[in-house]
Amino acid sequence: MQTDVLIVGAGPVGLVMAIELARYGVAVRIIDKAPERTDKSKALVIWSRSLELLERSGCSAALVDAGYKVTSVNITADKKPIAHLALDKVPTAYPYGLMLPQNETERVLDEFLNTLGVKIERTVELTHFTSSADSVVSTLRHADGSEETVETSWLIGCDGAHSTIRHQLGMEFKGDTLLIDWVIADIHLEGFPRTPEINIAWHSDGVLVTFPIAEDRYRIIADAGTAAEASAPPAPPTLEQVQAILDKRFPGGVRASNPIWLSAFRINERKIAEYRSGRVFLAGDAAHVHSPAGGQGMNTGMQDACNLAWKLALVVRGVGVESLLESYSAERSPIAEQVLKVTGRVTDMATLTGGMAQSLRNHVASLLLGLSPVRKLAADITSEISIGYPNSPLNAGHGLGHDTPAPGDRAPIRKNEPTTSAGNTPRFALFAKADGIPSDLLLRYANILEPTLREPFHPSGLWLVRPDGYTALAAKRGDWNAVTEYLDNISVNRTRDLLSASSSA
């Protein structure tokens, strides 16, 4: 069978990419040089917006069943409360952060991908590729040393921060490594109050963040001092060193035991400028890495995949124009830039030194986060439902007010409303009243538009919503020309052409 897309890297980003493409009927292969999936917890949190997007493929339920729901974030300074962010008030079907170790996330996604008829090819490594105007020819090395040459229409690099594909493309990974050592530990804690909360403790000695995982198991992240320029990477901490940090920054008899994973790291903040080079794309850590503050990294990569997959599926299936693909980098690159800025600022704030600076930080943070609108904004940013594409080249029309979505906004998700249409082709949804609609409009665009209308967000307007749930077009009620013009611009409309040919005959 001909392969349309080769995906390199079977971490969470590569798996989501494969799921999204496979469910749209795109022939994919997904390879990974590792003999088995990771046994480390690594990335831990799946946020609300990622779960909304993954619901469209049907795999959110299995992730939720496997995870632990965290409904708030507490921030304290020297044990005094600074802020309480309520995630359970976020307007979504998933009002929480889902705590799920990366090895479990990969297991669930892998099993779901298998139900779509796609299996990861392990101990297979991409060693070289050549891209032309029509295809990509890749050389794959198997575990026994044999090599295979495979030709595909597209190549997607989900192969992590040390991406082979990015290196071969010669793309500059711009950014810095922050000279602060960090410790990370997945351990069991005794004497720690079991609540569905992430706790961020600012202490005069440094920051301590605790994430509940399951039963008495927790993730702990703490800074461990500045590092010298060009110094060796930090060594993993011992259990005794972790206990010493707990004793100092979280006094009260909390005892650490039975470590599952102990590691140390320095934060890299890096990003490429463009996510596409001809027929080759990059996603996830291959395109951007940043501070783990806020747990945004894996989610940003998963959402890269959800953004690219529907566009690529339309092009592969001959339904969408190839220029759709130009919007991938234009939309996702600014999101990574924003994540870099936000997580960088959060890290800087958490690692402030000096009594006066810390005291000022605590006072200002308490003042600002004491305001309800600021807390709501912080919760929306944390859960990622505030992500949008206001400057997307795919946007058309203008915001209509009435608290309705503007082009580029996440479209409201209403109770009991389906998040996706039937069939294996990505389709836009039209939220509009039927009055005055051209009798053949839905039929003319049947290959890219849902066959039935949905209730508009306000009686005065109409909205065209993309397959990934973002608003593409907002127009006044009855402006059917805006709809047809938009769909004409993005689609290779065979249905329309057939109808025209039939009427001419």
Image (tube, helix red, strand yellow):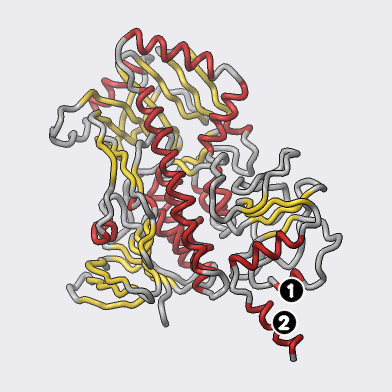
Q: Can you tell which of label 1 and label 2 is closer to the viewer?
A: 2
- Where is residue 54 drawn, in percent x and y? 54, 54
Asked whether the viewer can see residue 145, the reply is yes
Question: Disc 1 marks which residue?
Answer: 443
Numbered tag placed on residue 411 in the rendering: none
Image point (56%, 69%), residue name: 320
Which residue is at the far right?
435
- Where is residue 505 drawn, in percent x and y? 74, 91
Q: Is residue 139 left or right of residue 45?
A: left
Position of the N terminus, as image quadrant, is: bottom left
Q: Residues within 10 Å of mark 1 (few under 14, many from 20)?
A: some
* Nearer to the camera, 5 or 393: 393
Asked whether the viewer can see residue 303, the reply is no
Tell me the element at label 1: helix
Q: From the viewer's perspective, is residue 229 above or below residue 79? A: below
Q: Earlier in the sequence, mark 1 or mark 2?
A: 1
Image point (41%, 53%), residue name: 12
* Nearer to the camera, 433 or 414: 433
Which residue is at the far bottom?
505
C-alpha separation, residue under disc 1 versus residue under disc 2: 9 Å
Q: Residue 265's image quarter?
A: top left
Specify the amino acid type for callout 2: Leu
Numbered tag placed on residue 499 in the rendering: 2
Q: From the viewer's perspective, is residue 230 above or below residue 107? A: above
Image point (57%, 32%), residue name: 87
Specify the amino acid type for callout 1: Leu
Label 1 close to label 2 by CB (< 8 Å): yes
* Nearer to the camera, 216 or 104: 104
- Where is residue 51 drawn, in percent x and y? 55, 48
Image point (40%, 74%), residue name: 153
Q: From the viewer's perspective, is residue 145 above or below residue 405? A: below
